[in-house]
Every structure is written in structure tokens, then in C-alpha cells.
Amino acid sequence: MTLAEGARGKTRSELWKVTRYHRVKCFRRKYKEIINAMDEELAYMTKRTNIVIMNKLLNVKKSYEDEARKSHANKILSLNFNNPVDSAIEANDFIETDVDGVITKTVTPEDFNMTVLMTTDLAYFKSDWLHAFNPVYTSVENFYKSSVPIGKVKLMTQMGYFNVTDVPIINARVVELPFNSNGRVSMLVFLPSKGYVEDLFYNLSYIRLTSIYNLFKAVGPKLLTVRIPRFKITTELQNIPELVYDMGVKRIFYPDLANFGGISDYKVHTSLMKQITHIEVIEEGVNGEVEFLVRNDEQEIFSADRPFAYLIVDKKTDLILFAGMYTRPSVY
């Protein structure tokens, strides 16, 4: 969407169609206001930054920089690509500072070879739970795939009243685990009721968040023992161009087809795209209380000891902050 602000003609049309970025400027302005407010209000738990790195010889237009920076997460870096080592150092120092040192060494000198424009999208998430998991009950357990142990994880365990329901359209059972945000931000954990977690994850496009919330309201909170792995995941995707191309954004990658007249008067095309996310899930919470686990026959157990999907959602804006699958067990 940041590139769309400087795109023109068919290049812009492709970007608008795939991202569903609104063609009317006042709608785009309102969207930016919502995103900026969300980023500010949730800054204590999550940070996003989107950086467009360009060769300074291309003379980025000030009008484009001003428009792009109306989204506070957007940054424009103009560097001397003829000095790839210095450019990589400068870019990494800038990025590391911008994401509070959580993500480091984002680009390499090789990234600047034969490159005109690159984009980096970075985000991290770490928050206390609204109700902490007591570390006393965390234990190393088997993690299964198709009933076969494939590794070990540290399963955190908590008992309480949680929103939990079945979602037949995606063949999943889902539980809501609220973070320390007065219920505004939650993790939704999806366990497949049949099939594979990869199918479940991609089937999420067939259902809206409001539909899940309505199912929660219909059944109400239930007494539940929740068991989920403790984990820290840093994911770096370097095949973003292939994914974006398959979605229908194609012209931006061709020097003779890309039209970024709003960015520079010189010919500009996108050479490299990266996305890095860092998510850490541990026991800590805002409540210091120690609860005892007392199980009874009426109590259900939701045990994520097999591959699962998760969404971290902002219920105020109905936006998904992070989405992913946990499929490779590790003891963290």
C-alpha cells in the first residue's frame, strides 16, 4: 500500500486491486488515522515498521515521502547503493533502532547488488497475558502430528473461564486468550477437528472475525484447562515477490512495465521484498496470583500439543495483527 501511493496507471491499479486499498483519498486517509491510532495505543506490546529503501541517485520526490509518512509506521531511506557494505550497515542500524533492537541484521550487502528499490516489513509482538500462566505447571511434553510424537515442547497450563467454540466451516475448535489490554487484544488458537492445520489456516479466509465473536457470545465462557506451548518465533520471508506476483501484482517487478512516477522521475521498479516477524509467548501476565488446578468431570481440556494456527487480533479495529501456524516443536 505504501508503494501504491507512488504508483501510477496500471501499476497502481494492480496494487489497489490486490491490497483492496481504497481509490478514494479520504477513505485512505481515514484508514491511516485508524492504523496510526492503533499503533500508538498498542505500542507497549507491538511495533510495526515498513521501510522503503531506494538508491539516492533516483531522487525520491518529497511529495511521495510526505504522503507515505502519513502512516507513522512508514519510513523512506535513500542510500548510496554503490557502497553496499556501508548501505547495509546504515540500513540495519536504522531498522534495529526503529524496532527497539528486537530484530537485527535485516539486510546484507548482497541485497544492494543490482537493486533499485527494496521494501522491508518488520513487526514484533510481546505482551503479558491478562491472566498469567503459572510456571509451576509448565512441563516438557510430547508434540504430536497424526498421533505420532515429532518433538518436545514446554506446555504452559492454565485453568479458568475462556471463550471456546467449534467453527464447523473451517473444521476447527478455537479458544480466545486475552492479553493485557483490557480485553482489546487476544490470541485466537485454532486446533483442527479434522484435516491438516495448513488447510485450516488458509480456510480462515472464508470466515470473518465477527462470526467467531458471535459464536463465543452464543455459548458464553466455559471452565477450561488450556495448554499451549511456550514459544519464540522469528520468521523471515524472502519469497514475498513470488507470493505478491501470484496474487496479481506483477508490473512492479518489470523495469519496462513498472510506473512509479509518483516516487521518482527516473525509471523505478521493485527489486527485493522482505518480511520479518518476531513473536514471543511465555507465561508472564499482569496478575501475580497463583491459582491451583482443580480438575473435575465438567471441565474441558484444550491442549495445543499438535500443530495449530493462531491469530493475534485487535478487537477494537477488527484487524489481525499477526497470523501464523505452529508446526515445528522446540523447547523454549
Image: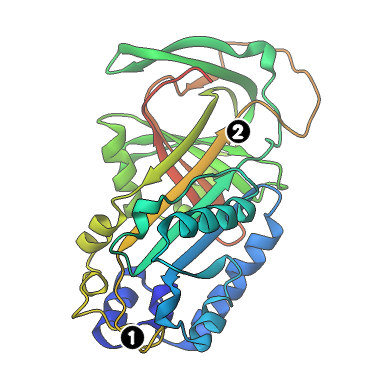
Q: Say if residue 328 shows up in the picture.
A: yes
Q: Which quadrant of the figure has residue 7?
A: bottom left
The reply, left or right, for residue 287 in relation to residue 311 is: right
**From this viewpoint, which residue is outermost toward the right?**
288
Q: CA distance from mark 2 to mark 1?
A: 56 Å
> Mark 2–mark 1 contact, CB under 8 Å?
no
Three-letter code, disc 2: Phe
* Image: 21 above or below 164: below
- Classify mark 2: helix, strand or loop: strand
Q: Residue at x 20, y 60 (%)?
A: 246
Pinpoint residue 313: horizontal percent, then vertical percent: 54, 50
The reply, left or right, for residue 198 in relation to residue 24 is: left
Residue on which disc 1 sits: 266
Q: Which quadrant of the figure has residue 2?
A: bottom left
Q: Considering depth in this image, is 144 or 332 the residue closer to the camera?
A: 332
Residue on which disc 2 sits: 162
Give the quarter of the figure containing the N terminus.
bottom left
Pinpoint residue 233: horizontal percent, then vertical percent: 48, 34
The reply, left or right, for residue 136 in relation to residue 170 is: right
Q: Which quadrant of the figure has residue 118?
A: bottom left
Q: Residue at x 34, y 82 (%)?
A: 260
Q: Considering depth in this image, is 227 or 84 the residue closer to the camera?
A: 84
Q: Residue at x 27, y 61 (%)?
A: 244
The disc, 2 or 1, on the residue closer to the chain's N-terminal end is 2
Q: Residue at x 50, y 62 (%)?
A: 50
Q: Say if residue 294 shows up in the picture.
A: no
Q: Nearer the viewer, mark 2 or mark 1?
A: 1
Q: Residues within 10 Å of mark 1 (few under 14, many from 20)?
A: few
Q: Residues within 10 Å of mark 2 (few under 14, many from 20)?
A: some
- Classify mark 1: helix, strand or loop: loop
Pinpoint residue 284: horizontal percent, then vertical percent: 70, 29
* Image: 135 above or below 176: above
